[in-house]
Image (tube, helix red, strand yellow):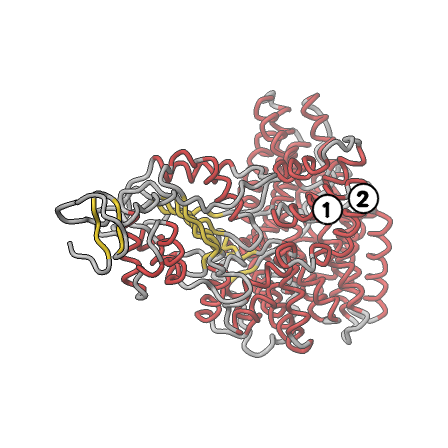
């Protein structure tokens, strides 16, 4: 090899003026210094401190790694990495779960771990896959100046260098499946953990990702988190009570609990102040100048990628009454067609701001809902909010009205005003559907009445009470019946029809009577009768006497009860209202039987039964059969009594009349006991006892418990009322 300006001799270099000391023959080979070995990538963040719970989700991630079949091919080599997509709303603990699992399983990944915050739901723009791949390739030893600029080329190079390796790839805070897909490694030996507020259904469908959904912590897990934060603080009764209240106020929401735990660790002596702040300030107590430590800010990031329509729906869901909602109600709330409403709900569900539950119901966590309500008040004008609430209230009122017509077709028809334009009740084809809808919507209907009262929508308040009465009686929701009619009494002062006052006093009096509040019951019922007399309203006089009969019977005065029942019969007969006449005849029969006038009792009850059957009124028929069962038992015909009681029981069960089922079960036990059929008596009395306890009817429950103890006792306190 020739040289310029120098020669090499015997390992000594001599310049043109140097001294030669030896000769070297042959060529000279120059080699670059060896490259240092590529370090194993170690990009995971620190192991989370204070992590609690999530045993089921950790186990699901374990199973995905160790026990699941291989998914679709993404690397072109006949298999794919194990992919787990951890989903849930902002602040629910997705990153902590991913990092905790990763640190517990580092031994499974000898080739290291890659990790990135994709900033899908953070301030600023989401990370672009081409930039993330540049970082990943650099971590894998590919110099940036040797990386192709094109996304597809980088994807190919990345998968080439990950195929056959046992790497963990953590893709945190992903925005969409499209952002994630280029970052999936090649081959079948890597494991990918993805966290996102989006459900990433595309990854599940196309790449076999295993979804792991995160919900709130359990009360036990939340308590562990907070008590750990207290450290050495003595566990007094007051401390335990404060922790219990904090657990309830946070609703198991991990970020809220974490923020409170951090404050407790800093100032454990201010535990009571932390409770007071959270109780009084709500979501504001979880705000902070640090975006990462502010629940409202973290939640706000979930709205960044929503459309205006979706953000409006999110805000309105924060103020709509009830613990959850349905597609039909949302269509009324928003004035959207059901197809558009469904798409908007799905978008909120995909963003983990809303959870779909069985039965087509949608719900938010309380803290997310509080943020949605704040959003409504800060972004929507008052007239927009009130119009939306009016529409959804009209939807619930008019559907409840339709349901009530199925349950009580013979009751007085009092129509509510027409609903707001474009609002249509939920279709109810039959009585079973009506009862199922009322069961599902009961809490929402009560909340709707409270919202209507707040808005001063007195007509809605009153008509919701009217249309819930039969349902409340059937299901034994007696305290709710009192509450709704108390609200209706306030509303009646603002309504033009004077009949609403007398009807309200009558229903409130009956509700008080059912709860055993006899003085209040009598006061309201006598006021109802007085108003009916002063306004020359024979229909309301008839109903007032009917309910006064029941109320005096509940008080144990069967003579006064019988007198009012006779008045009711006369009024209803004169008014040509045969179904209500039958109800009053049954009352006469019942109270006559209570006074041992069994021939009179049987005659009136048989007449009542004929009328009820003729007019197809199974509710009244069941009540009358119950009375006839009592009469037969007390006149020694126990087999006939059982026949009547069992027939009544069948009808009441079919009607879903849980309140009266309990009374009939109580009654049927007595002829069984009289016939020496003690086991049958025990069976029906145990069921009656359970129902009485569920309905909060403690006096009845105590009486049946005594009957179970002795298999002997009185038969009951009064007939069923309709």
Residue 590 image position (x, y, % from top left): 71, 43
Asked if the residues shown at circle 2 and circle 1 are in contact, with their CB atoms under 8 angstroms apart, the answer is yes
**Does residue 614 appear in the picture of this structure?**
no
In this figure, which residue is indicated by the disc labeled 2?
270
Asked if 239 appears above or below 287 in the picture, the reply is above
What residue occupies the far left of the structure in this picture?
26
Residue 241 image position (x, y, % from top left): 77, 37
Q: Is residue 86 left or right of residue 713?
A: left
The disc at residue 373 is: none
- C-alpha separation, residue under disc 2 versus residue under disc 1: 9 Å
**Does residue 696 appear in the picture of this structure?**
yes
Q: Mark 1, residues whose alpha carbon is within 10 Å: few (<14), some, or many (≥20)?
A: some
In this figure, which residue is indicated by the disc labeled 1?
263
Task: Using the rendered view, name the quadrant where residue 404 is placed.
Answer: bottom right
Q: Give 492 or 632, whichever is nearer the viewer.
A: 492
What's the residue at 50%, 72% (across, down)? Answer: 307
Residue 502 image position (x, y, % from top left): 79, 65
What's the residue at 71%, 66% (across, down)? Answer: 461
The number of numbered discs placed on residues in the rendered structure image is 2
């Amino acid at each position: 090899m020739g040289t310029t300006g120098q020669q090499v001799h015997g390992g000594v270099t001599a310049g043109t003026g140097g001294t030669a000391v030896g000769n070297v023959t042959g060529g000279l080979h120059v080699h670059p210094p060896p490259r240092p070995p590529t370090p194993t990538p170690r990009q995971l963040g620190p192991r989370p401190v204070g992590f609690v719970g999530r045993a089921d989700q950790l186990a699901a991630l374990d199973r995905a790694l160790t026990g699941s079949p291989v998914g679709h091919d993404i690397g072109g080599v006949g298999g794919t990495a194990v992919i787990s997509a951890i989903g849930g709303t902002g602040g629910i603990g997705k990153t902590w779960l991913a990092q905790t699992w990763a640190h517990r399983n580092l031994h499974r990944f000898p080739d290291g771990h890659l990790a990135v915050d994709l900033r899908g739901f953070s301030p600023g723009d989401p990370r672009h896959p081409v930039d993330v791949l540049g970082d990943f390739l650099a971590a894998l030893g590919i110099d940036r100046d040797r990386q192709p600029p094109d996304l597809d080329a980088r994807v190919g190079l990345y998968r080439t260098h990950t195929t056959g390796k046992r790497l963990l790839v953590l893709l945190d805070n992903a925005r969409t499946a499209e952002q994630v897909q280029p970052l999936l490694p090649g081959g079948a030996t890597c494991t990918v953990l993805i966290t996102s507020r989006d459900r990433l259904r595309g990854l599940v469908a196309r790449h076999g990702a295993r979804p792991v959904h995160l919900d709130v912590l359990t009360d036990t897990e939340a308590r562990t988190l907070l008590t750990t934060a207290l450290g050495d603080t003595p566990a007094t009764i007051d401390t335990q009570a404060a922790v219990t209240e904090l657990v309830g106020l946070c609703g198991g929401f991990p970020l809220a609990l974490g923020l409170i735990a951090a404050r407790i660790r800093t100032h454990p002596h201010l535990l009571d102040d932390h409770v007071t702040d959270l109780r009084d300030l709500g979501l504001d107590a979880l705000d902070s100048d640090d975006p990462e430590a502010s629940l409202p800010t973290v939640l706000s990031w979930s709205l960044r990628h929503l459309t205006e329509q979706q953000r409006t729906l999110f805000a309105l869901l924060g103020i709509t009454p009830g613990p959850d909602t349905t597609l039909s109600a949302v269509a009324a709330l928003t004035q959207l067609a059901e197809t558009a409403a469904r798409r908007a709900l799905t978008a909120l569900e995909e963003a983990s701001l809303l959870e779909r539950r069985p039965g087509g119901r949608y719900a938010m966590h309380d803290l997310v809902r509080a943020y949605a309500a704040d959003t409504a008040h800060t972004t929507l004008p008052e007239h927009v909010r009130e119009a939306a609430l009016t529409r959804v209230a009209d939807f619930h009122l008019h559907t409840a009205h339709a349901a009530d017509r199925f349950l009580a077709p013979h009751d007085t028809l009092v129509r509510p005003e027409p609903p707001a334009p474009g609002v249509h009740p939920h279709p109810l084809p039959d009585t079973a559907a009506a009862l199922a809808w009322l069961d599902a919507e009961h809490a929402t209907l009560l909340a709707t009445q409270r919202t209507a009262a707040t808005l001063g929508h007195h007509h809605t308040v009153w008509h919701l009470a009217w249309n819930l009465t039969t349902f409340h009686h059937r299901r034994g929701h007696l305290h709710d019946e009192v509450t709704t009619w108390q609200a209706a009494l306030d509303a009646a002062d603002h309504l033009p029809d004077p009949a609403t006052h007398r009807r309200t006093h009558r229903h409130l009096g009956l509700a008080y009577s059912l709860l055993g509040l006899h003085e209040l019951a009598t006061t309201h019922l006598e006021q109802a009768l007085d108003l009916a007399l002063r306004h020359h309203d024979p229909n309301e006089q008839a109903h007032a006497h009917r309910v006064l009969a029941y109320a005096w019977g509940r008080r144990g005065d069967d003579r006064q009860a019988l007198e009012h029942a006779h008045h009711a019969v006369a009024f209803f007969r004169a008014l040509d209202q045969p179904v209500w006449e039958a109800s009053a005849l049954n009352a006469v029969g019942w109270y006559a039987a209570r006074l041992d006038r069994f021939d009179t009792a049987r005659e009136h009850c048989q007449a009542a039964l004929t009328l009820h059957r003729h007019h197809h009124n199974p509710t009244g028929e069941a009540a009358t059969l119950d009375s006839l069962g009592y009469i037969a038992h007390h006149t020694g015909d126990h087999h006939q009594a059982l026949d009547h009681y069992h027939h009544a029981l069948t009808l009441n069960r079919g009607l879903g009349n849980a309140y009266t089922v309990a009374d009939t079960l109580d009654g049927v036990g007595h002829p069984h006991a009289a016939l020496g059929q003690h086991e049958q008596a025990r069976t029906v009395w145990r069921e009656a006892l359970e129902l009485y306890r569920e309905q909060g009817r403690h006096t009845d429950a105590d009486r049946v418990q005594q009957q179970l103890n002795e298999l002997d006792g009185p038969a009951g306190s009064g007939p069923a009322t309709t």
